[in-house]
Image (cartoon, helix red, strand yellow):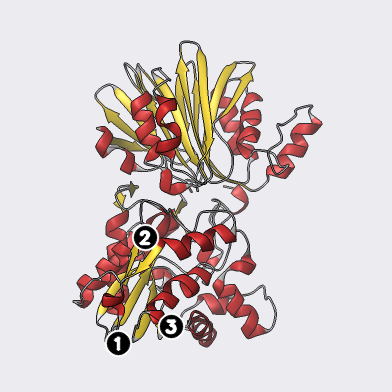
Amino acid sequence: MSGVFGAVSQKDCTEDLFYGVDYQTHLGTEYGGIAVLSGKRIYRQIHDISQSQFKSKFYEDYKKFEGKYGIGVISDSDAQPMFLNAKFGSFAICMAGLIENTSELIKDLHKRGLSFSETEDGSANSVEVVAKLISEGDDFVSGIEHVFDKIIGSCSLLLLCKDGIYAARDRFGYTALVIGKRGRDYAVASETCAFPNTGFTVEKFLMPGEIVLMNENGLKQIRGKRGINQICSFLWIYTGFPASTYENVSVEAVRERCGATLAKHDKDIQVDVVSGVPDSGVAHAIGYSMESKKPYRRPLVKYTPGYGRSYTPPVQEIRDRVARMKLIPVKDIIDGNRIVVCEDSIVRGTQLKNFTVQKLWDNGAKEIHVRPACPPLMFPCKFCLSTRSTGELAARKAIRDIEGKDIEDISEYTDPTTAKYKKMVKWIEKDIDVTTLRYQTLEDMIKAIGLPRETLCTYCWNGECLAKNNII
């Protein structure tokens, strides 16, 4: 994932921009960037935040900027915002999403004489590709629509220019964009958690394919809904911040409902302690505790000041290091107790096994019952940068071992009523070394979210996508 934020102020937007972007920090770990329109010029700053926090990198920078319009981003891969001079004017752009056909787009643009800046690893920056596609339009709006027509994957973007800030949500709605209002000032964000402490209230959630323009004159819709809504379900289960909402549905409330549902299916086990893997498993555990009437306690405490998420870094070595160092066991809570561990999901299984479960066993846990809030992940995400390959997923490893090879038809393994599904879960249960393992069903997860099934992307669990190959 990546998180974007834009601000329009009647006076100076830079303080809103600084804090607003910081509230997207949970969505990326690699780069932070801001761009501000001051007079007729766009000033930009990008920093590597892989080993530091956004605030510490940008605190001095933002105070040097001044302007009424600004955009910023927390990026999971590409350095951004990108700046480009186009035939219809200069602009800066940042985006959230994942473009699957970047290589094909680059080849096509090369044939037409366009060139690209080289990144450190020799690849092209996907945000630069989007910027070049926009420059092929007759104006900013046609350029954005050209991007939507050409890409496979997802792209929600903010574009800063002399007109103000264009905000465009991915035409299938995989990633979210929400508008906030404070008097005559406006903001746009990936996460609504950026609004309460900066004084903004939710004005509207952009629809798939919708394009709006924000400037000192107000908010104007340029294009209405174009595509179909397939918002990522994982936003509620893991990715989103607990204080955020998407499509007016609270992340924290969904997680509590997920946990309560898990508890309803656990009438046959006796436990002493309910816990959640910090931070995203906490609300699931609170819901489980409320439903089961068992006490919620913290056998593992996250050292929050120093460590972010272990899921988002691009390198396994870094993910393992964060997972190992961030969770500190509390032996007095663990020793001799039967513990339910609520987790948002099991992706690869290595961190849960080596750095969560093992710490509980080492500190005297009597039983460990793991309860993920979503079904087994079966497919790497096509629309946001999260899981990178099928082979690394814990469920696929189990299937490969059971079948003796990789298989294409895994329908029996996605159906929780089949013998093969139960065998797969038992394999993972043994592999991560826990007393019992029970997953949430897809139906119960969707019910907890509370939106119509056809409006939710569930690709990573069942491989189904209404917007397959981006064809409406």
**Which residue corresponds to the image point at 35% horizontal and 56% vertical from the top-left?**
451
Marks 2 and 3, how far apart in space?
20 Å
Taking the image as drawn, is residue 210 in sight? no
Label 3, secondary structure: give it. loop
**What's the distance in space between the residues labelled 3 and 1, CA to CA?**
14 Å
Quadrant of the image occupied by residue 440: bottom left
> Is there any visible trace of residue 144 in the rendered image?
yes
Q: Residues within 10 Å of mark 2 (few under 14, many from 20)?
A: many
- Residue 439 vertical placement versus 379 (above, below): below
Q: Is residue 313 left or right of residue 368?
A: right
Residue annotated with mark 2: 280
- What residue is pinned by disc 1? 269
Q: Kindly identify which residue carries mark 3.
A: 434
Kind of residue at disc 3? Val
Q: Identity of the amino acid at label 1?
A: Ile
Q: What residue type is labelled 2?
A: Ser
Looking at the image, which residue is at 52% across and 75% down? 414
